[in-house]
Amino acid sequence: MRGAAWAAAGRSGQLWPRPPAPGPPPPPLLLLLAVLLGGAGAQYSSDLCSWKGSGLTHEAHRKEVQQVYLRCSAGTVEWAYPTGALIVNLRPNTLSPSRPLTLCIKPLRNSSGASIYLEKTGELRLLLRDGDPGPRRAPCFGLEQGGLFVEATPQQDISRRTAGFQYELSGRRAGPDLHGLSAPCRPCSHAELLLAVCTSDFVVRGSIQDVTHEPERQESAIHLHVSRLYRQKSRVFRPAPGGGGWRGRVSTLLECGVRPGHGEFLFAGHMHFGEAWLGCAPRFKDFQRVYRDAEERGLNPCEVGTE
């Protein structure tokens, strides 16, 4: 109830007032009324992509709800000595009513001192709890589902604590239950494959050299030898020693059950917090058939060499 009250108060620019005297905590309803009747407006901090702030800039007896405004598709929030709460408002320049966006967050290494919630109209849904190990997958949700509410955990000693996370916005759909992006194991349809070839962060032709599993992260790493590099936004694939193509690795979920296979495939996917994640991976001969059929009917959204 406390977090929901703070969220509602923060939206209206209120402060958490100083308690009148030590004693048992007041009932939640009285806390909510105290916030709604509180004092002056909250502090605002803004930056284009990332934000850094400190709880030491506040008066010790006033636990404020600060507003943070960000306008980029990726960045970080770092909150040293966290006290009170933050409301993180994402207003990306790419926001369009006709193009829903998905937000994913990933806690920074050794982040501590605050919990992160999905907040909408005062209702909170826990995303990352302070003190818990990082989730197997970065939580993702549509921007229309709400915003981020970061609540500091009450501490006697806040020294050496920094709460923080990375965020990314994308046009891909969020999966159910806030567990990452949708349908990571389902084979791509013909339409999805043709679109992936044109819009993915990386598109390569190659073969699987090995597959290693990381059960603690619930992920599998697919080690690739690439014979043709169509596109890559980051240097995922680097020249193989001695020449003759490229090498690199892409990730997928352990539950997908990927195994080494013979023959050539087309691999397409996206970067996610600095790592390459697999999207579509048809056999190359199947991709050739789909692409040529679409080309004959004038339905291919872009041109790709299929030889």
Image (spheres, helix red, strand yellow):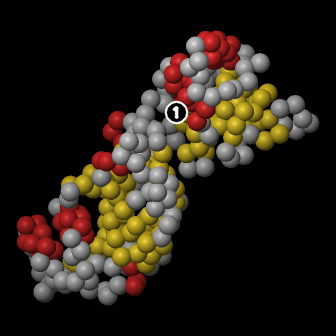
Residue 294, percent from left and from top: 59, 16
Q: From the image, which quarter does the C terminus lie in?
A: top right
Residue at figure coordinates x 13%, y 87% from the top left: 21
56 versus 278 height, above or below: below
Q: Which residue is at the front of the view, 130 or 57?
A: 57
Q: Is residue 162 visible?
A: no
Q: Left of 161 or right of it: where is 26?
A: left
234 versus 55 height, above or below: above
Residue at figure coordinates x 17%, y 61% from the top left: 1
Amino acid tagged 1 = Leu
Residue at figure coordinates x 68%, y 21% from the top left: 265
The image shows a total of numbered marks equal to: 1
Q: Residue furthest right?
A: 242
Residue 108, percent from left and from top: 51, 60
Q: Is residue 7 visible?
A: yes
Residue 194, percent from left and from top: 57, 24
Q: Residues within 10 Å of mark 1 (few under 14, many from 20)?
A: many
203 versus 66 height, above or below: above
Residue at figure coordinates x 50%, y 37% from the top left: 218
Q: Which residue is at the front of the view, 95 or 142?
A: 95
236 versus 212 height, above or below: below
Q: Which residue is mark 1?
A: 253
Q: Which residue is at the front of the view, 11 or 177?
A: 11
Q: Residue furthest front?
A: 298
**Toward which corner of the image does residue 140 lie, by quadrant?**
top left
SS label for mark 1:
strand
**Toward which corner of the image does residue 69 lie, by quadrant?**
bottom left
Residue 103, percent from left and from top: 42, 49
Q: Which residue is at the front of the view, 39 or 80?
A: 39
Q: Left of 294 or right of it: where is 284?
A: right
